[in-house]
Image (cartoon, grey):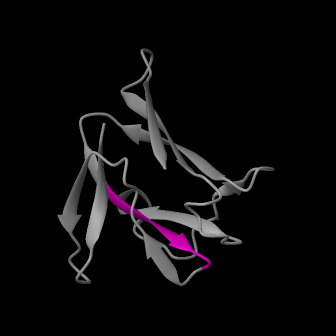
Amino acid sequence: MSVKKQYLKSKPVCKVTFKLTKQEAKAAQTVRLLGDFNNWDTQAPPMKRLKNGAFTATLDLPKDSQYQFRYLLDDKEWENDWAADQYVPSPVSLEDNSVIRV
């Protein structure tokens, strides 16, 4: 898992690329990136699957903010990003959510 941040000089946003390797995706056919930035919408479009089996998605997020997020594998199994900036208890389960600060 990895999170890459690229701050834009022309706008107050950060281009954030989220990536899961094939092994981290646990052979999932689809992976959705859900979080505060898309209201945890379980119908959000899936991440792009690469030829090597990894999954990636890039979002433009407003700077000076933080967002909770998780990955949803095959619409049934939740996974955190272990490269996240922080972890906080989820308000809806006993698990933690990943947090990214931009």
Q: Quadrant of the C terminus?
A: top left
Q: Is residue 8 magenta?
A: no
Residue 88: give x, y in percent of width and height: 19, 63
Classify residue 80 by image quadrant: bottom left
Side of 94 relative to 40 (left or right) = left
| Total numbered circles | 0
Q: Majority secondary structure of the magenta segment?
A: strand
Classify residue 27 by image quadrant: bottom right
Side of 96 relative to 53 (left or right) = left
Which residue is the extreme one toward the right? 51
Residue 48: give x, y in percent of width and height: 69, 54
Side of 29 relative to 37 (left or right) = right
Classify residue 97 by image quadrant: bottom left
Side of 3 relative to 68 (left or right) = right
Residue 19: give x, y in percent of width and height: 55, 48
Question: What residue is rendered at 28% in x and 53% in y?
Answer: 99
Question: What residue is rendered at 61% in x and 60% in y?
Answer: 23
| 77, 45: nearer the viewer | 77
Question: Is residue 83 depicted above or below 40 in this figure?
Answer: above
Question: What residue is rendered at 27% in x and 45% in y?
Answer: 85
Question: What residue is rendered at 60% in x and 69% in y?
Answer: 26
| 63, 5: nearer the viewer | 5
Which residue is the extreme one toward the front? 23
Bounds of the magenta segment: 68-74
